Image: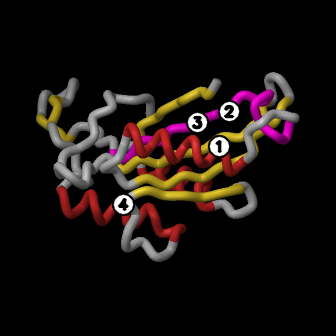
Amino acid sequence: MTIIKQTGVQSSGHMKNLRGYINDDRKVILRDSLNMDGCTNPKRWAHHMWMTREVYGHNKAARRVRDKKTGELKEAKNTILFHQILGFNPDECDLNGGWLSPEACMRYAKEYVGKHYPNQQIVMALHNEYCKADKTHRYAVHIVINRTDLSTGKRLDEGRGKS
Protein backbone atom coordinates (compact mmCIF):
# COMPACT_ATOMS: atom_id res chain seq x y z
CA MET A 1 0.00 0.00 0.00
CA THR A 2 1.27 3.43 -0.90
CA ILE A 3 0.79 6.48 1.31
CA ILE A 4 0.18 9.87 -0.30
CA LYS A 5 0.82 13.11 1.55
CA GLN A 6 0.38 16.58 0.06
CA THR A 7 1.38 20.08 1.12
CA GLY A 8 0.94 23.38 -0.65
CA VAL A 9 4.06 25.47 -1.26
CA GLN A 10 3.31 29.13 -0.52
CA SER A 11 6.48 30.71 0.86
CA SER A 12 9.93 31.32 -0.59
CA GLY A 13 11.45 29.51 2.41
CA HIS A 14 9.38 26.39 1.76
CA MET A 15 10.31 26.59 -1.93
CA LYS A 16 14.01 26.91 -1.12
CA ASN A 17 13.92 23.87 1.18
CA LEU A 18 11.99 21.80 -1.35
CA ARG A 19 14.35 22.76 -4.17
CA GLY A 20 17.35 21.79 -2.03
CA TYR A 21 15.81 18.44 -1.13
CA ILE A 22 14.79 17.54 -4.69
CA ASN A 23 18.19 18.59 -6.08
CA ASP A 24 20.36 16.85 -3.43
CA ASP A 25 22.43 14.31 -5.39
CA ARG A 26 23.57 12.62 -2.17
CA LYS A 27 19.98 11.61 -1.36
CA VAL A 28 18.30 11.18 -4.74
CA ILE A 29 18.36 7.66 -6.19
CA LEU A 30 16.33 8.38 -9.36
CA ARG A 31 14.77 11.42 -11.04
CA ASP A 32 12.07 11.82 -13.64
CA SER A 33 9.76 14.52 -14.97
CA LEU A 34 6.63 15.17 -17.00
CA ASN A 35 5.91 18.12 -19.31
CA MET A 36 9.28 19.73 -18.65
CA ASP A 37 10.17 20.15 -22.33
CA GLY A 38 12.70 22.92 -22.78
CA CYS A 39 14.18 22.49 -19.31
CA THR A 40 17.67 21.33 -20.32
CA ASN A 41 19.11 21.27 -16.78
CA PRO A 42 17.03 19.05 -14.43
CA LYS A 43 18.19 21.07 -11.41
CA ARG A 44 16.67 24.25 -12.91
CA TRP A 45 13.13 22.85 -12.68
CA ALA A 46 12.04 25.52 -10.17
CA HIS A 47 12.99 28.36 -12.52
CA HIS A 48 11.33 26.61 -15.47
CA MET A 49 8.08 26.24 -13.47
CA TRP A 50 8.34 29.84 -12.27
CA MET A 51 8.56 31.03 -15.88
CA THR A 52 5.44 29.06 -16.80
CA ARG A 53 3.50 30.54 -13.87
CA GLU A 54 4.74 34.01 -14.82
CA VAL A 55 3.42 33.64 -18.39
CA TYR A 56 -0.03 32.67 -17.07
CA GLY A 57 -0.07 35.18 -14.20
CA HIS A 58 -0.02 32.48 -11.53
CA ASN A 59 2.87 33.83 -9.46
CA LYS A 60 0.37 36.14 -7.76
CA ALA A 61 -2.71 35.22 -5.78
CA ALA A 62 -5.96 34.99 -7.73
CA ARG A 63 -7.96 36.67 -4.99
CA ARG A 64 -7.75 39.30 -2.30
CA VAL A 65 -8.83 39.05 1.33
CA ARG A 66 -9.64 41.56 4.05
CA ASP A 67 -7.05 42.16 6.73
CA LYS A 68 -8.71 41.25 10.05
CA LYS A 69 -7.13 44.19 11.89
CA THR A 70 -7.38 47.01 9.36
CA GLY A 71 -10.17 45.82 7.07
CA GLU A 72 -8.05 46.66 4.04
CA LEU A 73 -7.94 44.37 1.04
CA LYS A 74 -4.66 42.51 0.65
CA GLU A 75 -3.33 39.72 -1.53
CA ALA A 76 -4.29 36.25 -0.28
CA LYS A 77 -1.71 33.53 0.20
CA ASN A 78 -0.75 31.98 -3.10
CA THR A 79 -0.07 28.27 -3.41
CA ILE A 80 2.35 28.05 -6.34
CA LEU A 81 3.17 24.32 -6.21
CA PHE A 82 2.03 21.13 -4.58
CA HIS A 83 4.51 18.75 -2.98
CA GLN A 84 3.28 15.19 -2.81
CA ILE A 85 5.06 12.21 -1.30
CA LEU A 86 4.34 8.66 -2.42
CA GLY A 87 5.71 6.56 0.42
CA PHE A 88 5.97 2.82 -0.10
CA ASN A 89 5.53 0.40 2.80
CA PRO A 90 8.85 -0.96 4.07
CA ASP A 91 7.85 -4.58 3.43
CA GLU A 92 7.19 -3.74 -0.24
CA CYS A 93 10.70 -2.33 -0.84
CA ASP A 94 13.53 -4.52 -2.10
CA LEU A 95 15.91 -3.09 0.48
CA ASN A 96 13.81 -4.98 3.07
CA GLY A 97 13.29 -8.11 0.96
CA GLY A 98 10.18 -6.84 -0.85
CA TRP A 99 9.38 -6.84 -4.56
CA LEU A 100 9.62 -3.10 -5.36
CA SER A 101 12.89 -1.84 -6.80
CA PRO A 102 13.63 1.90 -7.11
CA GLU A 103 12.80 1.63 -10.82
CA ALA A 104 9.43 0.00 -10.07
CA CYS A 105 8.59 2.73 -7.54
CA MET A 106 9.44 5.41 -10.09
CA ARG A 107 7.34 3.66 -12.77
CA TYR A 108 4.40 3.63 -10.35
CA ALA A 109 4.90 7.35 -9.63
CA LYS A 110 5.10 8.17 -13.35
CA GLU A 111 1.84 6.28 -14.02
CA TYR A 112 0.19 8.03 -11.06
CA VAL A 113 1.10 11.56 -12.20
CA GLY A 114 0.30 10.74 -15.83
CA LYS A 115 -3.20 9.68 -14.78
CA HIS A 116 -3.96 12.45 -12.26
CA TYR A 117 -1.90 15.41 -13.57
CA PRO A 118 -1.38 14.90 -17.33
CA ASN A 119 -1.24 18.64 -18.09
CA GLN A 120 0.95 19.83 -15.22
CA GLN A 121 4.72 20.31 -15.13
CA ILE A 122 6.08 17.73 -12.71
CA VAL A 123 9.45 16.69 -11.30
CA MET A 124 10.00 13.55 -9.24
CA ALA A 125 12.87 12.44 -7.02
CA LEU A 126 13.07 9.03 -5.36
CA HIS A 127 14.76 8.80 -1.95
CA ASN A 128 15.60 6.03 0.51
CA GLU A 129 14.04 7.35 3.71
CA TYR A 130 14.49 6.17 7.27
CA CYS A 131 11.49 6.08 9.61
CA LYS A 132 12.53 6.75 13.21
CA ALA A 133 9.22 5.46 14.58
CA ASP A 134 9.59 1.89 13.33
CA LYS A 135 13.32 1.99 12.49
CA THR A 136 12.84 0.88 8.88
CA HIS A 137 13.97 2.11 5.48
CA ARG A 138 11.53 2.69 2.64
CA TYR A 139 11.39 4.31 -0.75
CA ALA A 140 9.54 7.58 -1.19
CA VAL A 141 8.98 9.53 -4.39
CA HIS A 142 8.78 13.29 -3.84
CA ILE A 143 6.63 14.90 -6.53
CA VAL A 144 6.54 18.63 -7.29
CA ILE A 145 3.43 19.70 -9.22
CA ASN A 146 3.24 23.12 -10.84
CA ARG A 147 -0.27 24.54 -10.56
CA THR A 148 -0.56 25.83 -14.13
CA ASP A 149 -2.53 23.51 -16.40
CA LEU A 150 -0.68 23.64 -19.72
CA SER A 151 -3.79 22.81 -21.78
CA THR A 152 -6.27 25.27 -20.21
CA GLY A 153 -4.00 27.90 -18.65
CA LYS A 154 -5.98 27.61 -15.40
CA ARG A 155 -4.68 26.87 -11.93
CA LEU A 156 -4.90 23.35 -10.57
CA ASP A 157 -7.33 23.38 -7.64
CA GLU A 158 -6.39 20.73 -5.09
CA GLY A 159 -7.93 22.59 -2.18
CA ARG A 160 -5.99 24.63 0.29
CA GLY A 161 -3.47 21.97 1.33
CA LYS A 162 -1.38 22.24 4.45
CA SER A 163 1.50 24.66 4.28
Cβ–Cβ under 8 Å for marks 1 and 2: yes
Along the viewing direction, whichever of 30 and 8 lies nearer the viewer: 30
**Mark 3 highlights which residue?**
86
Q: CA distance from mark 3 to mark 1?
A: 9 Å
Cβ–Cβ under 8 Å for marks 3 and 2: yes
Q: Is residue 39 left or right of residue 89?
A: left
The residue shown at (18%, 56%) is: 57
Which image quarter is the N terminus in? top right
Residue 9 occupies which quadrant of the picture? Answer: top left
Q: Earlier in the sequence, mark 2 or mark 4?
A: 4
Q: Earlier in the sequence, mark 3 or mark 1?
A: 3
Q: Is residue 138 magenta?
A: no
The amino acid at mark 1 is: Cys
User: Which one is closest to the eye, mark 2 or mark 4?
Assistant: 2
The amino acid at mark 4 is: Met
User: Which one is closest to the eye, mark 3 or mark 4?
Assistant: 3
**Mark 4 highlights which residue?**
49
Q: Earlier in the sequence, mark 4 or mark 1?
A: 4
The residue shown at (20%, 41%) is: 75
The residue shown at (74%, 45%) is: 101
The amino acid at mark 3 is: Leu
